[in-house]
Image: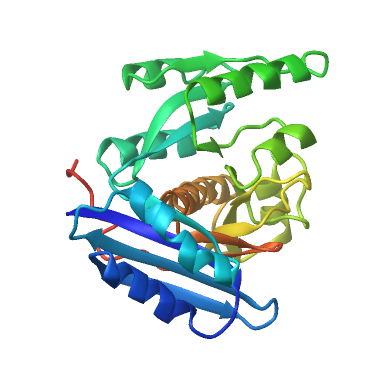
Amino acid sequence: MTKYCLTVTCPSTRGIVAAIAGFLAENGCNITDSSQYDDLGTGQFFMRISFVSESDRTLTDLDQSFLSIASPHDMQFAFHDETQKMKVVIMVSRFGHCLNDLLYRIRIGALPVEIVAVISNHMDYQKPVVNADIPFHCIKVTKENKPEAEAAIMKIVTDQQADLIVLARYMQILSDEMCQKMSGKIINIHHSFLPSFKGANPYKQAYERGVKLIGATSHYVTADLDEGPIIEQDIVRVTHAQSASDYVSLGRDVESQVLARAIHAHAHHRVFLNGNKTVVFPASPGSHSSERLG
C-alpha cells in the first residue's frame, strides 16, 4: 500500500470533511491520520489527511478525479507521496551548528529530505559537506556582484530541482526578487531577540540586559527581513550566573532544534500559509521515527 497525504485550503463551508472523506473511501483509500482547522477570523478552512491507497489508484488518478470535489468548494489542494523525500538546498556562512545538526539528522533518517546541494559564501564547511557526498558550491557575494551571485544560486536550485531552500545561518540578505520567486519555499532561522537586540552580538546585548529567556524563531523568508510567517519557535531559560558565552552556546542549541522542527513540518506538508501567519498541524504518528540509530 502506498502512503499519501492530501492538503486542502478553501473557504469554510458545510460538507467539506464529508466530501473529502467520501471521495477517499470511494477510491479505495483508508485514512490513517487527519487534522483540520477552521479560522473564524479569515473564514478559511485548512485540512491535512494521511491515507493509504488500498486500490490501484495512482497519485495522478486521484489528483484528476478530485477536481470534481475541489471545484464546487473552491479548494486549493495537493496530493503528496509520503515516501518521496523533499529535495533541499542548504545555504550557510560561517556558523555551522545548524548545518552540522541537519547533516546528522538527515544521515539517520530523522528528516524526510535529501540535501541536493550546500551553498556558502565561505569555504569553511566544504570538507564536512563533501565528505557526506553532497555537492558544495562556494559563491562569494558582494554589493557589486549580488545579482550575478543570486542568479548562480538560483541556477543550482533549478538544476537540482530543489523544493526548498534552508538558510542555516546564511548571513546575506536575499533580494526581493528572489524572495518573491521562492515565496513559501525558503526557511530561515534566527534568534528571537528581535526587535530589541539588533546587529552584532545580540546574545551579548541580551546578557548585558539580564534577560531570562533565550529563544529562536524559524520562518518563511519574505521581502520584509525577519518578518515572514513563523513556523516554529522555542526558548531556554538562563540565569544571572551564566556568561555571555553560555548564552551563545545555549542559543545555538535552540536554533538547531527549532530549524530542524520547522523543516520537518514543511517536508511533511504540515504547514499552511494563512495570511501573515501559518497553520502548523501536529506530526502524524510515526513521522519522527528514524531509519537507524547512531
Residue at left 50%, top 31%?
A: 90
In the rendered view, would you say 286 is above or below 174? Answer: below
User: In the depicted view, which residue is nearer to us: 165 or 6?
Assistant: 6
Tell me: 150 left or right of 241.
right
Identify the image quadrant of the C terminus.
top left
Identify the image quadrant of the N terminus.
bottom left
- Where is residue 270? Give x, y as percent: 45, 60
Tell me: 167 left or right of 82.
right
User: How many labels sit on residues?
Assistant: 0
Q: Is there any visible trace of residue 261 in the rendered image?
A: yes
- Where is residue 272? Give x, y as percent: 55, 61
Residue at left 56%, top 58%?
A: 231
User: In the depicted view, which residue is nearer to us: 122 or 85?
Assistant: 85
User: In the depicted view, which residue is nearer to us: 227 or 73?
Assistant: 73
Residue at left 41%, top 72%?
A: 20
Residue 278 occupies which quadrant of the picture?
A: bottom right
Q: How is the image coloured?
A: rainbow
- Where is residue 177? Give x, y as percent: 77, 33
Q: Is there any visible trace of residue 81 in the rendered image?
A: no
- Where is residue 98? Give x, y as percent: 47, 39
Residue 29 occupies which quadrant of the picture?
A: bottom left
In the rendered view, would you say 169 is above or below 61? Answer: above
